[in-house]
Amino acid sequence: MATPHRVVYSPTRPTTQMRHRVDPVGALKPTGEGVLAPPPLSQPSDDAASASSWRGPGLAADRLEPAKGRDAADRTSSGSECANEADVEETRVPFLPARRYVQKAHILAACGQTEPIDWATGGLQACGVLLPSPDPVQHSTAQLNEIESEAGLCKIGEATYSEVFSAQWRYMPRTRYDKFNSKKGAVKGERLMQVALKVIPFGNSSVKSGTGEPQTTLRDLYQEIGATLALSRLSERERAKLQEARMQVKMPLKPKERELGANFVKAFRVCICQGPLPAPLLRAWDRWRDEYPALCENVRPDYYPPSQLFAVFVLEMGGETLENAEVTTWKEARSIIRQLALSMALAERNNRFEHRDLHWGNIMVTRYQSNLTFLYQLPPSGSRLKSTLISIPSYRVRCTIIDYTLSRLHIDNDARDAAASKPASYDPANNVFYVALKDEALFQGEGDIQFDVYRQMRTCARDSWEGFYPQTNVLWLVYALQKILTTKAAGIRDELMALAASKLGPAFDTVPPELRRAACQELLRRWMREFEQCESCSQVLKCTLLDLYKGQ
């Protein structure tokens, strides 16, 4: 499971570098002009940011206390009202105790199910996907492909353990945040959006995955479901807190201000299905193979038996990977690192979270047409004893953190979580989900600084992977910054040099250019050392490079 494996996307250029398992949630198809874009439904507009969770059988829901004056804020900020305050709910994580031994019933319970969805009778529509149902007898394969493509169904990538598709999704918005990245549906109040479907075969030791690797185990899938739902809920609760805080000080959100709070991928639903892969997915798979024959290495997934189980993660579209994204200025680069650091610091405080695999294939980037600002919570520091709100300019980029396959976190099953039988070993104070990284191949990779990070993580953890070592998150942030500085536009480094020069002061204006440049480089090295020596993302937020705690 931990061995670095192949992954491919649908980018303007192939992804060739070997990496650990990556699932390209939100990877986008290129248009005819070579510009990355999702299917037409989800073209980002000035107000496109994200969307709320789906309200249905996949995830239970619980009430939030409405923020006073929130309806007024909605009208001020977005020009229209959202759902009534009485209907404002949040995604609730089902009761998830950490388990050493996971059974099928535990997986189903984590998804709010007692039985798998039968794909033979319900098809994709049983998962909540919007898809026409043309008669395959009366339509040719070409006609079916055209109908399904126009409906937004397509494959967007593949990985060692999963296939990733995109499709339309329908939901009822309940808060101001819900209306972004979607459009009105046919029914009053409903919204339509494009989502990513991450399809993972699991639990059948006699049938291999599309690359010939063993299927995902029950325990590994249980861990990924728990992390995905818990971090999605964390983001949702943080947004509610931010909006509540603004209402308390009578400062409604501005039209181009988003209460982002955290950048973890939004999970609309996770469901368990059974049976051969539905025909529409196979046709989408074929279209992708025909369009990108050089990228398609997985075996056509038409060989699974009727008893095969699949986990389907319905996730928000996150854009394109940082590896493929165009980053041209230091302001854009700093915005990405700021968003990552603020999100990781929040998860460290609330869930004692470590991602443990945050390479640039697991950082998605969306580019906007206008410069939005994002609202976050800045933790206490120095003379500030309480957390404070901070609104940072996006510089037209937003990042999304995905894929928690190797992650470690504590899940708080609070009073609002669903009742369930508790295993005898359940300890609410130590309900830790983690993966023991025992595969030596993970630490033997060469040729990229990503593999150095795995070895550095091992040094931090000393092979005791259940523990909490927030410095591993810092290692990945340093990695992301180094990747941006060494592979993106040269202008980024020039801007950094100019920034360092501005900090030297007027006394250096008369210094010979060679000495001035050397002084700037030394100042940049000092800033990088400050960044690298942090022991948590909360400390990273104080670094000079991010410039968040002004005046301290």
Image (cartoon, rainbow, N blue to C red):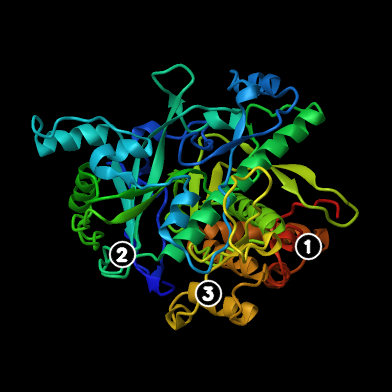
**Disc 1/disc 3 C-alpha distance (Å):** 47 Å
Instruction: Give residue 547's position: percent from left, percent from top.
Output: 74, 54
Q: Which one is earlier in the sequence, the residue at label 3 or at label 2?
A: 2
Name the amino acid, label 2.
Asn
Mark 2 Cα-neighbour bin, 10 Å: few <14, some 14–19, many ≥20? some
Asked where in the image residue 334 lies, by quadrant, the reply is bottom right
Which residue is rendered at x = 63% and y = 26% of the image? Answer: 255
Q: Amino acid at mark 3?
A: Ala
Task: Determine the image quadrant of residue 128.
Answer: top left
Alpha carbon distance from label 3 to label 2: 21 Å
Q: Secondary structure at mark 3?
A: loop
The N terminus lies in quadrant: bottom left
Q: Which residue is mark 2?
A: 204
Q: Quadrant of residue 252?
A: top right
Frontmost of labels 1 and 3 is: 3
For marks 1 and 3 on the same chain, the one whose residue lies earlier in the sequence = 3
Mark 3, residue position: 436
Q: How far apart, in angstroms, are the residues tagged by discs 1 and 2? A: 62 Å
Q: Earlier in the sequence, mark 1 or mark 2?
A: 2
Which residue is tagged 1?
504
Vertical placement of residue 518 versus 108, above or below: below
Nearest the viewer among 299 and 88 is 88
Q: Residue at x 44, y 61 (%)?
A: 103
Residue 442 visible: yes
In the rendered structure, the answer to whether residue 137 lies left or right of residue 2 reads left
Q: Counting other residues with Cα less than 10 Å from the Cα at mark 1, is it few (<14), some (14-19), or many (20 or more)?
A: some
Q: Relative to 317, is 470 on the left or the right? A: right
Q: Residues within 10 Å of mark 3 (few under 14, many from 20)?
A: few
Answer whether residue 488 is visible to the viewer in this image: no
Give the number of the mark in front: 1 or 2: 2
